[in-house]
Amino acid sequence: MVLNEEMMEAIEKNLVFLATVSKEGVPNVVPIGFARPLNENTILIADNYMNKTIKNLEDNHKLSLIVQDAKSLPYQFKGTVEIFKSGEYFDEVVDWAQNVMSELEPKSAILFTVEDIYSVKPGPEAGKKIA
């Protein structure tokens, strides 16, 4: 999937919401302030305080992310994740988080590969797959 400039800017500048589901089928949604696109297909997410979310991702690797800001349309991204507890992506989220708040100690880096993009703009186009 291809994230356009508007989508990438909205993700980098706003709170995003991550939705996961446990293997028992229990849904979970959390707000995240540390998410940024690495390229037009992947988003890097810092795991600073995740508990249920990271457990759900370890169990099934499926993620849905929603973002909206005042300038862009709201979007929903669906895809799969890889979780890193060391290495290049982990080091990047540690540096990133600690530059913002020195007391943060990220537990892992989540690399989210976007597979589908949907409009969540209210109205008749809501839920329409756009990429």
Image (cartoon, rainbow, N blue to C red):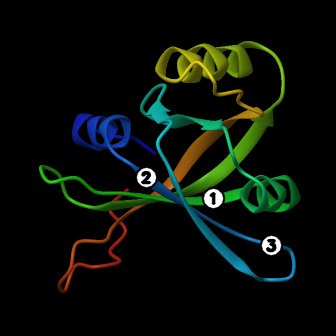
Residue under label 3:
22
* Dot label at residue 63: 1
| Picture coordinates of residue 20, whole percent (x, y) | 67, 66
Residue under label 2:
16
| Picture coordinates of residue 29, whole percent (x, y) | 58, 68
> Does 1 sit left or right of 126 as displayed?
right
| Picture coordinates of residue 22, whole percent (x, y) | 80, 72
Q: In this view, does 123 lie above or below 87?
A: below
Q: Which residue is drawn at 39% across and 41% down?
A: 2
Question: Circle 2 sits in a helix, a strand or a loop, which is it?
Answer: strand
Query: Distance from label 3 to label 1 (Cα)?
Result: 11 Å
Q: Residue at x 72, y 58 (%)?
A: 53
Question: Circle 3 sits in a helix, a strand or a loop, which is it?
Answer: loop
Amino acid residing under circle 3: Ser
> Closer to the N terminus: mark 2 or mark 3?
2
> Does 34 sit left or right of 124 as displayed?
right
The mark closer to the camera, 1 or 2, is 2
